Amino acid sequence: MKFNGSITSKLPRVGTNIFTQMSALSNQEGAINLSQGFPDFDLDPNLIDLVRQKMSSGLNQYAPMQGTLALRESIAAKLYNTYGAVYDPASEIVVTAGATQAIYTVITALVHEGDEVIMFTPAYDCYAPAIQLSGGEPVYVQMHYPDYAIDWQEVKKLVNRRTKMIIINTPHNPSGKVLGPSDMDELERITAGNDILILSDEVYEHIIFDQAKHESVCKYESLRERSLAIYSFGKTFHCTGWKMGYCVGPENLMKEFQKVHQFNVFAVNHPIQAALADYIKHESSYNTIAPFYQEKRNYFEDLLSTSRFEVIKSEGSYFQLVSYKNISDEIDTDFCVRLTKERKVSAIPISVFYHNPVHEGVIRFCFAKKPDTLKKAAEILCKI
């Protein structure tokens, strides 16, 4: 069946995203999937038991639109204990159907026709389409191999009266870069004395390495008052399929957020909310995540040490960038396809995370996998 009338695409340049493409190819070829960012190991059975208990207790109907009060109170306590930030559970926290929905809702609620939004590439692929669907204009600042540092002087030059928002992501997907205190100082200076909003994507907040501290916007009062910060239970607790996250921000901004949220989702999974409300009361539920993933990062790095790939140190997230410049001159999209088909290991090309593809011979692996999975993949990669 086909519609024969005339349609004009709102996103003419957007097709099936790279994660879907590479996972499909990986499945087709029977390859080890290190492309899409999801764990292949089980989550804490205590959390599963909590969900089962909440379902059995009858919490299977709609939750409140903002999320259950118990979970919002637990989130508020977590934010205070982690960052010293005070958020009102009644008006400044909303539970969402994952981080992507939260990001889309922030942009839809606050970006208007003709507004400019500064974002840093390589970037997760949901930012720009949401901006464009809201009638806004993405303004791109490129970060580059090997350090993927932000050029704040370039950012300053791009700020003008049409700048509505700046989107930051730390720890960063895909590079694993972590913003430090000096980056936050620069962001404070750039936004001082104007009405620029900040969307802070912090879904990997607890996956940060080498004793570094996560520099959340929540820690900085001058940033907190103009920021909406996005978090993900799925990333933290290895349950990406649950699609559970949350957004926090000042009451007047969250009021606009809720206006959109109530119409594109309204409410999210009730028994899982109730389970998470109990689970995150224990700080060990999230404070042990960093060493858990650092062990995996170090293990995968060691496995690749005898390969011809050049490992780029991951500061956070569960992604590892490598350069293949010692192996091939192919563009990264071709290299990833050939790697999947011929070597049966899949990865993600970094060029697709840019507005206009930048080919620097870098690809991304996900190391949120069982040791056996990483070992099997590395044995293949070391033979190339």
Image (cartoon, rainbow, N blue to C red):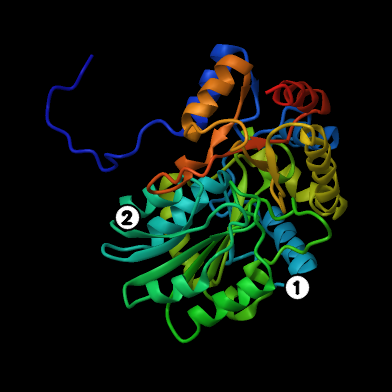
Residue 379 falls in which quadrant of the image?
A: top right
Residue 49 shown left or right of residue 233 in the figure: right
Which is more N-terminal, label 1 or label 2? 1
Residue 181 falls in which quadrant of the image?
A: bottom right
Q: Are marks 2 and 1 in contact (CB under 8 Å)?
A: no
Q: Position of residue 374 (x, y in %)?
A: 77, 28
Q: Position of residue 365 (x, y in %)?
A: 65, 35
Q: Residue at x 56, y 31 (%)?
A: 328
Residue 37 falls in which quadrant of the image?
A: top right
Q: Position of residue 309 (x, y in %)?
A: 68, 36
Q: CA distance from mark 2 to mark 1?
A: 34 Å
Residue 169 shown left or right of residue 73 in the figure: left
Name the residue tied to disc 2: 134
Between 120 and 206, which is closer to the camera in this rendering?
120
- Badge 1 marks a residue whose secondary structure is loop
In the picture, the quarter occupied by the N terminus is top left
Mark 2 crowd level (few <14, some 14–19, many ≥20, 10 Å Cα): some
Residue 349 shown left or right of residue 50 in the figure: left
Q: Residue furthest bottom?
A: 193
Name which residue type carries label 1: Gly
Q: Is residue 159 above or below residue 20?
A: below
In the picture, the quarter occupied by the C terminus is top right
Disc number placed over residue 84 in the picture, else none: 1
Between 261 and 373, which is closer to the camera in this rendering?
373
Q: Position of residue 312 (x, y in %)?
A: 68, 47
- Badge 2 marks a residue whose secondary structure is loop
Using the rendered image of the protein, determine whether residue 237 is visible from the camera's viewpoint.
yes
